[in-house]
Image: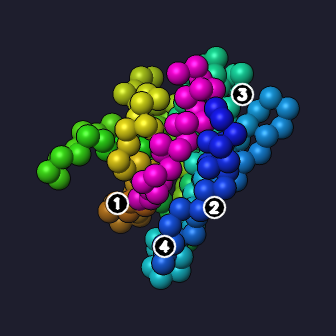
């Protein structure tokens, strides 16, 4: 990776959004680089309030295991007073690409996640052991979403959906790809 590519990720500001605050930070200690893309949603709809972090860790262990996916730390603060559950397939990363005439190709990366509901964490690994989410997904992504779907006490579903700003996946690709040998 170049210094310029790393700087573009670590100093990333994104666009202004009236309901969300986004902050990216990087930490390099010893032989490990961590990139955190933090998002919090404002108070306009209290039930939709959340804090979320996509976390990429680049170190020898992650590289040797081919773990290119972001870790997830999602806290659905707006649901804290409810007894919610997260179904086994309730946490996903969804990537759309090759969009033409309002039709896109999709990758649905179901996360192996655990939750102290409404707090969801994942190391990014796929629930079913394999995934179509490869390094090119970052480069080709037109939309990169995270969804956490919670079952409320009355049985209805509540989904928190958030996304990386559209230009960020290509930027993180320029950092991840060389580190992982692509």
Count neighbours of disc 4 (C-alpha within 10 A) and say few if under 14, some if 14 to 19, many if 20 or more.
few
- List the residue tagged with mark 1: 157
- List the residue tagged with mark 3: 59
The one of 86 and 140 positioned closer to us in this rendering: 140
Q: Do the residues labelled 3 and 2 touch (CB within 8 Å)?
A: no
Queried whether the magenta region covers residue 168, the answer comes back as: yes
SS category of the residue bearing label 2: strand
The CA span between labels 2 and 4 is 12 Å
The CA span between labels 2 and 1 is 29 Å
The quadrant of the image that shows the N terminus is top right
What residue is shown at x 37% (from left), y 50% (from top)?
A: 143
The one of 157 and 180 positioned closer to us in this rendering: 180
**81 lies left or right of 33:** left
Q: Identify the magenta region.
A: 161-182
What residue is shown at x 85% (from left), y 32% (from top)?
A: 30
SS category of the residue bearing label 1: strand
Count neighbours of disc 3 (C-alpha within 10 A) and say few if under 14, some if 14 to 19, many if 20 or more.
some
- List the residue tagged with mark 2: 23
Q: Earlier in the sequence, mark 3 or mark 2?
A: 2
User: Whole-percent x and y of residue 167?
Assistant: 46, 52
């Amino acid at each position: 990776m170049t210094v310029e590519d790393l700087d573009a990720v670590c100093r990333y500001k994104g666009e202004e959004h009236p309901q969300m605050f986004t902050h990216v930070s990087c930490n390099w200690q010893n032989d490990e680089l961590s990139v955190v893309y933090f998002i919090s949603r404002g108070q306009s709809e209290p039930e939709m309030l959340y804090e979320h972090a996509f976390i990429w860790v680049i170190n020898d262990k992650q590289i040797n295991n081919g773990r290119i996916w972001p870790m997830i730390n999602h806290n659905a603060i707006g649901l804290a007073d409810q007894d919610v559950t997260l179904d086994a397939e309730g946490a996903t990363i969804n990537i759309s690409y090759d969009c033409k005439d309002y039709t896109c190709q999709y990758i649905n990366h179901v996360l192996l996640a655990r939750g102290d509901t409404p707090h969801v964490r994942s190391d990014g690994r796929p629930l079913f052991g394999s995934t179509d989410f490869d390094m090119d997904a970052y480069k080709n992504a037109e939309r990169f979403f995270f969804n956490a779907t919670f079952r409320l006490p009355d049985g209805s579903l509540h989904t928190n959906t958030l996304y990386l700003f559209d230009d960020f996946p290509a930027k993180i690709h320029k950092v991840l790809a060389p580190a992982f040998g692509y």
